[in-house]
Amino acid sequence: MRLLFRRPRIALAALLAALAAIGPAAAQDAAGFQNFLVTLRQQALARGVTPATVDQVFPTLMLDTQVIALDRRQPAGPANTPPPMFEPYRRSHVDAQRIAQGRQVYQSMRSRLATIEAQTGVPESMMVAIWGHETNYGAITGNFDLPNALATLAYEGRRRDLFTDEFIASLKMLDRGVPRARLRGSWAGATGNPQFLPSVYLRLARDGDGDGTIDIWTSEADTLASIANYFVSAGWRRGQGWGFAVSVPSSLDRAAIANRTVAPRCPRVFERHSMWKTMREWRALGLAPVSKPWPDDTVMATLLEPDGIGKPGYLLTGNYRVILDYNCSNFYALSVGLLADAVEQ
């Protein structure tokens, strides 16, 4: 059966008038976007999105130049650019307000959190810290229309396959009964309290309160259960911490412990980590915990000194890399871990 893209007649005149008003270059982009939707519609139907959802969504899609501008503003930076300092980031992301509100959430939901931790092994405070870091406990979740933003990013083409997949996943969310009004979030397609991409929602979001729906927008229980399930899927090890701050002797031979492997994902993040050593080996090299006791001698960890020699260092376990799976940034992962520690104090 041949699939045809049907533009609504009522919108055609308005579209042509808009194109004439915004200038030749923008008009060309907008017209190109409408042509691109023909292919996108075919892909959505071929991958199982219902015709009813396709017919509901596609007439509403318009090129969002703000989304394109925000995407192109993302820093790439040359490989030899020195990284910024972590301490200013830490102060703004592990701040008194976020800690205080996190402790309030932590105390008010202890029963629910304890149940989820017992089921998954993910610490209660870690779930709270992700929520606090992603959306300030639901205060800032984004107001972009997800299908429209994702269709725009797919058209732009810089990461076409990724955003085509996420656009189609957003349509499948509608097929599962998620109201269109819920599909709002960041310009890059993340939605809800945990800022899940649509494909992540379909794969990992969970019903935490047993009401038969998965609501990561207004349900605290569903939000926390979904975050924990993400961590389980990424390989969180029950009973192991994420890491801790250490004092590092100035005499440490950093060249001897340098990481000599290249990570296939986020290489610039992982190249800042040392090679793996046991806690026993790190202790023998003169490192000492700042505020936590040493874990078991056999636990493996890498060393990260985000602000260089003479500043606080961190020994990081495999669970730290689970946080990086959520957002591949050392500053993000360190701040989440430090916020989790502060929340449970």
Image: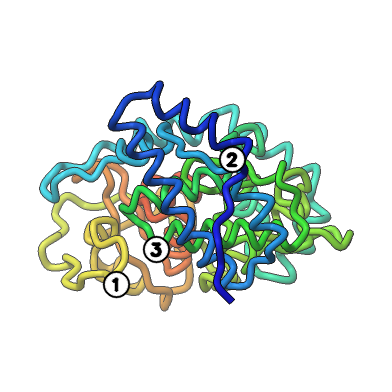
Which one is earlier in the sequence, the residue at label 1 or at label 3?
3
Q: Which circle marks residue 30 in the picture?
A: none
* Residues at circles 2 and 3 in contact by the CB criterion of under 8 Å: no
What residue is disc 1 on? 276
Circle nearer the viewer, 1 or 3: 3
Q: Nearer the viewer, residue 26 or 96?
A: 26
What residue is disc 3 on? 161
Three-letter code, disc 3: Asp
Q: Nearer the viewer, residue 2 or 249?
A: 2
Counting from the top left corner in percent of width and height, residue 318 is at 43, 69
Q: Residue at x 42, y 64 (%)?
A: 321
Measure the C-alpha gap from mark 2 to mark 1.
Answer: 43 Å
Q: Residue at x 45, y 30 (%)?
A: 92
Asked whether the viewer can see residue 37, the reply is: yes
Looking at the image, residue 39 sits to the left or right of residue 198; the answer is left
Looking at the image, residue 270 sits to the left or right of residue 55; the answer is left
Three-letter code, disc 1: Trp
Which one is earlier in the sequence, the residue at label 2 or at label 1?
2
Measure the C-alpha gap from mark 1 to mark 3.
Answer: 34 Å
Measure the C-alpha gap from mark 2 to mark 3.
Answer: 19 Å
How crowded is the residue under tag 1: few (<14 C-alpha within 10 Å), some, or many (20+)?
many
How crowded is the residue under tag 3: few (<14 C-alpha within 10 Å), some, or many (20+)?
few
What residue is disc 2 on? 145
Q: Where 155 sits versus 264, above or below? A: above
Three-letter code, disc 2: Asp
* Residues at circles 2 and 1 in contact by the CB criterion of under 8 Å: no
Q: At numbered mark 3, what does the secondary structure look like: helix, strand or loop?
A: helix
Looking at the image, residue 231 sits to the left or right of residue 85; the answer is right
